[in-house]
Structures are given as C-alpha cells and as structure tokens.
Amino acid sequence: MSSTKYRLSSLPLPSSSQLLTQSLTPDPQTPSISSFVTDVLPNKPSIQRRPRLLSPEAHFSYVMPFPVAFPYNVEPPDEQEEGVDAAKVVEKWLADREALHPSKDNENVYYPDPEKRNQKRILIGLSETGLRDCLPHLDVGDAFTTLGVPSLTPTAPAEAPEEMKPNAARDDLIDILSGHAVLLSPSQNTGPWSLRYSGHQFGSWAGQLGDGRAISILSTVNPQNDTITELQLKGSGRTPFSRSADGLAVLRSSIREFLGAEAMQALGIPTTRSLALVSLPNLPVMRERVETACILTRLAPSFLRIGSFEALSPPGRKGGMMFFGGGQQEANWEALRILGEFVSQQVLKLSIEEGKPWGKELVLEVARRNVKMVAGWQVYGFMHGVINTDNVSIMGLTIDYGPYAFMDTFDSMHICNHSDDGGRYAYGAQPGMIIYALRALLNSLAPVIGYEQAHGTAPPQGWATAADESKEMDKKIDEWSEIGIREVKDEMERVAQEEMSKEYGRAMRRRLGIRSSEEDTERNNTIERDISRSLLSLMSSHRLDFHRTFRLLSYFQPVGATKEYKEKFISALLKNCSEPAFIDEFTAKREWNEWLDKYSSYSDSLVSTEERLKANPRFVLRQWVLEEVIRAAQEDKGAEKGKAVLGKVLHMACNPFETWGGEEAELRELGLISEDGEVEELNEEEKEERRFCGAFALSTVQVLSKRVLSPSLYALLEIPQAIAVRFTTSLTCVTQSNIARGLPAVCRAEAPVEEQREGVMDGCPGATLHNAHISAPASSTSESIRLRARRYRQIIAIAGRRPMIALDRLTERRTWHQLRVVAGRASPLGKPFSKTNVRPKLA
C-alpha cells in the first residue's frame, strides 16, 4: 500500500478506459482539450456560458470553472464607434478572464490574468473523513491548521491572527477548489467537464437539464483500493446547462450539502462525499437578497444519473420538444449503447463477458443499489425533498442535497420541501418515487434490452444506425422497447420491493438492537409488525421526536425492569413530545407500557446497550442546527468563529453516536441512572454540545408577551401560560415567494428583552405556540380576516416543518387578529382541536 502523497495538481490519473472523458462522446463544439485550449477559450469562450442544446450524441461538454458574478458586467461598446462587433466585445471580455496562463511550476495548472480576475478565496471547511476515505493520497499541506480548533464556543483571539505563510500544497488546494486555477493537460486530453442529462421533475418531462452549476475537474485512483474518485466543484460558474441561472452557489446551500453528505456517510447511508468549502466573500450572488458565493467540492466514483440515460432515449423518442430555457434533442441510440457499456463495465463493474447482454443486469443493479439507499433514508428519517430522475444516481448514492431534512417529530407524510405542495416527495412517498425513477431508467434502456432479448447478444457498434433514418426501423425500436419492458418491468419491481424490504428490516432491527437471522422471514415479519410499525405508530400518535426516542430506547433494560423503572422510562420518553399540551397522558402511558412489554419479550435477542447506541445517533443534523451554523458563518464572513463552529458541527456529524454533551448527566436528570457518586459539572463547550443534540433550539426561550396574547387564547388552547413560549431560532417570517422556492427565513420575530426568561422549557421539551400578526381593523369580519390570512398563508416556517394556520380574535386588543401556528397543527375558526379536524386548508 503506497503512502506517497501528492499535491492536488499532481494526483495520479486512472487509465484512459476508466476516464469518462476518454470513453464517452464530447460536445462537438468542444471536441478535445487541445482544441478547447487553442480555439474555444481564446476565440469563442461564450459557448461554455450560453445555454444551448448539445448535439444528440454528446454525453458531456468541456467547461472551465468561472466563478464570476452574473449577469456579466461587460462594458458595452461606444455607440458612436463604427464597425465595433458587440459579440466580439463579449468574447474578448470573457477570454481576458479565463484561466489561460500555465503555471511556472506545473504546466498542467492554468491561472487567469490576476489583473482581470483575482478574487479573495478562503478555505472554511475541509472534511477529514472525506479525505481519509476517498483521497488518502492527497497532500493538503497545513490546510487543517489554518481552519483552527473546532469549537461551538470559540473565543476571540487575544491578538490578530498571523498572516498565512505560503504553503505549496495548501495554496494548490485552495486555488483549484475555488475555481481560480484549472487543471488542463492537452497532451493527455484531460480537463474539466460538465455532464449532459435530462429528467422528469415532479412527474413532468423537463427535457435537457445537465450540470448547470457543477463542473468535474479531475478523476483519480485511490491507491488503497483502486477505486475511482471524481472531484466536482459545485457553484463554480455558468455552463451550457445553466439556462437562466448564474451557475453559482451561496454559502448557505453549500454548508448544507457539505455537512449533509458527511452526516449521511456516518449513518451508513450511500452518499456522495464532501471534501472542501471555499468561500468567495467578495463575489455577490443574487437570490431573494444579495448573498456571498461559496464553492463546494464533492466526491463520488461517478456523478452519472438516471437522467443521463433519459437524455439519449427520451419520452417520445423524436425529441424536438421545447421548454422554457431549453428543450430536448431526439434520441441517439449509439450514444445510449456507448453510455450503457461504460456504466456496466467501468462504473458498476458488472461481471459480464464481452459481447454478452448487459442492459437487463444494469437496470437490476441500479435498482438494488437505489432501494438499499432509500431504505436507509426511511430508517434514519432522512427526507431528500427533490427525487427527480435527474437527482437519482446510477450508483445508488444520495446526491444533490437541496431542501433536505432529518425527521424531528415523526410524521410519515412530512414534507421538507415547501415547493412540494402535493407531497409528491414526502417522507412516506420516497420509496415509491425511487421506483418511479427506476421505471424511467427501464423505459430509456428498453430498446437495448429488447434488442438483446431478440438477438442474444449485446448491441454492436451501429446497432440502430438505420433506426435513426428509417421509419421501418422506428417501428423496430418500438418493438424492442415493448419486449424490453415486458421482459424486465415485473422482475425489476419485484427485486426492488424485496431488496428494499430486506434492507429496511435489517437496518430497523439494528436500531432496535434485536438480533435475528436474515433467513428467518416469519420472525422478522413479526418483529416488523409488532415492534417496528407499532413503535412508529406510537411516535406519530404522541408526537415524539424520531431520533431522541430511538436513542433513549437504546438505554432500556428489559431484564428485571420494575414497574417504577418502566414508569420513569415512559415519562422520559414522553418528554420528547413536541406538543405535550395535546397528549392524553393516561392513554400514552398505557400504550407505551404495552409496547415495552412486547419489546421486552425479545430480551434474549437484544444486543448490549453499547451496540444499540452505535446504531442510534445522539447528534442529528437538524434544520435548526444548520441554521445556526450558517448564521455563524455568514456573520463571521469566513473568519475564525465561523470556521470553528462549522468544524465542530462537522466533527459531531461524522461521529453522531458519541455521548456528546454529557449524555450520562442527562440520563441522571431523567431518573434513569442512580445519583450515586459525584456528578461533574459540564463546561461551556459541553453545554453547547448538549444543546446541539436537542430536538429544538433552546438557547433563547422567550415568553410570549401578554400584550399580544390574551388569556382567552391560552384558555382556548388549554396551554398554561408558563409553557407558551417561542424560540427566536426557529420562528421565522417568510415571504410567499420564499416559501415557493423553499428558501430560509428573511427575518425573525423577537420578544422584548425584558420578557426573556431561562428555564421555561423544564418539563416541556418543544413547547409549541408560535405567533405572527395580521393588522386589521376591529370591525373586520371573520371572512375578511380569513381572506387576509390567505394572502399571508404560510408566513411562518418552523424548523423546516410545514405549518398549518388558523385565526382567533383576541379579546384584549381588538385592533389585532391572531395568526397562530402550533407545531404544524391548528384548528379552524370556532372549532376545537380533534383528530378529525387538525389540518384545515386555506385556499
């Protein structure tokens, strides 16, 4: 095993047969790196930045990273000048800023003219686990030292930090991963590229999509296991697939994906990986407000998707459909064959003899991988939010972390994406949406599979050339498609269901700590029915936090459990309720007692507490945690505090099963551990760790002002005033347009300082009354207020939950009407809360 480390610009390349750019077909407008460097970049660089449909045979296009504010600030030519070609002015402006100048130290590293483009670049995050697992041979120099000590309670340095001294490996890393320097080798025909793919978005065909803000810069071989790792920059500028977007990513979304991918890896769920975050604080990005840019480097063996196949074999086959900002090319059967052979041989590495059929096995293998992935999502309460077919990996990796979330209070139909009004990608719908994506893959490969069934061999070069030109061959393609679907559809869905069920059951039993043989189907089915499903039902009925419930159950000791012990344990479980005011405590305790009795019947099969803790995270990357990290980074603008908080949360996300924040002390407080012995007081860092392991943001709890909340409303809700609280970190006022885009808060509501009070949460984890106001005259009718409420619908987003709203007229201040949100549950006007009337719809 080699221990040699290389700078990023000198990492060893795979063999040419393993390189995507050597095996697949480039965009004819960027046919090779040699022509790209000598012709495209100096003369017509805009073809990289203009949205366009690639030729039907193309799989990718060579593209240079170009993190520049968009629209580009090109000075228009003087109107009085004659003979000035405006198009040439644009081309020259772009060419002047391209990385066209080879480095003196390495001829494969190209830099832009520093007088034309040389923005500030700050490394704010580097994943030690991503580096260890995927790029152990990468030399990052002193990069980790520059990030400082990870901490949730960073202190300001006594004196200004010293200016960083030059470090070749670290400088190489930051320059390349910021999109400033570019790796190009005309002699080896290697350079950066973006993939072409199409897809179905929210069930509708969207045509050509592609890497609109992602550019892959390099593939390298892990010397420890000979696997390929592709490095991709997300947010590095416009590509031919950007349509009307700027190709950039903001700090907020980059941090979310950086942390999310590594958190998923720690939970054992297949995922792309994160390597680094480079902030570009002087590069403005227009979203709902002006934000700063950030580039994420993510890693994977391949970023090919189901949409990569759909681009070459689209619905309707003939293409020609036009969409806003794009369209779809006609099918290209030869390109489909080339992609399929590369994926089966080099990406999935299927054991298939040369010349033998590969189409069916490719579909089945992609199905197996993806259903195992989604089973992991369901077991750990992960919600992707946008499972469009262009976001589903051929390798079964979780990819494209957008509006994702981890489950808080268990809700089988929770929706984490505010733009998903119909709940298409709700938690409980995720397995079905993966099946939907697999059907799209089958439809795309059906002609190949049908050909293989008819001929008994893999399709040779030119297998369907005539089909591109002949109507008779079009009919043949349709026949092969019918054969392919008929041959594989039922088997694919059976394999998918079986593998998903098997993986889900195995992983859920691991969380519960119940040993059971994979072959004992009857026993496993009983465990799922009596233990797993009934546990989820209890969580849903009593509004319990998903992860804290599992974590606490890891400590349950069924052997010798006394009545008193079980009562204490059930009380501890119910403290994880997000809406304690609405619990029927008698029923809850009875139902939990019955469930614990069933669970205890498997005591002989339970693994140790230590083993159970290894499957149930103490730390979960919740929405409010992400918001705090993002806020620290934004306020600190890439300086030491932001780096420290980001680094510590990354460390916790990569080690989620540790007993962060004095967990033993927490168990003592719950009465589950005896008070014997001296209890060591937590230091400030441990207190913050404990807070970050909570279900809710508990740093600033504020009592609702009596001036805006009347006793009559307390009475209506049957909530004692002492527990009617709100959190400044989770109560957010959001505009309708923000909700539609799934964006975070633009402003926060806070009570006066004198009303802040600590300790309100005692005995009431997650107190739930959240308020906003709609100004209206006292004479307003209920109907006029209801109409006004519709305009402000979903004005509050609570920790990623999908809120429901209701109105109530206050008795003390007739000049205000109350818009209230109670942890996603509310009652319509004049009607009490009930199980049949908790989700009113306001059109």
Image (spheres, rainbow, N blue to C red):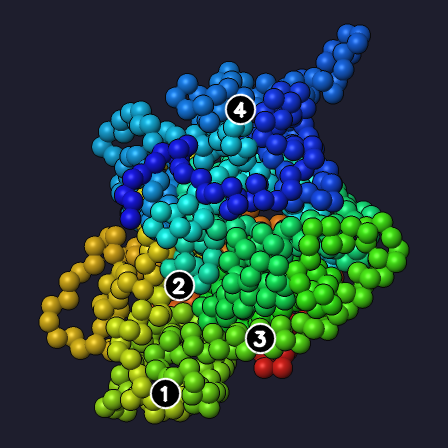
Label 4's element?
loop
Quadrant in which residue 474 is drawn = bottom right
Assess disc 3: are there few (<14), some (14-19) or many (≥20) residues with their C-alpha within 10 Å of its C-alpha: some
In three-dimensional space, the C-alpha distance between marks 2 and 3, rounded to whole angstroms, equals: 24 Å
The residue lying at 60 percent from left, 34 percent from top is: 63
Residue type at numbered disc 4: Ala
Quadrant in which residue 387 is drawn = bottom right
Mark 3 vs mark 1, foreground winner is 3
- Residue linked to disc 1: 599
Mark 4 vs mark 1, foreground winner is 4
- Between discs 4 and 2, the one toward the N terminus: 4
The residue lying at 30 percent from left, 57 percent from top is: 689
Mark 4 vs mark 3, foreground winner is 3
Percent coordinates x, y for residue 296 in the rendering: 47, 42
Mark 4 vs mark 2, foreground winner is 4
Numbered label attached to residue 99: 4
The answer to whether any part of residue 823 appears in the image is no
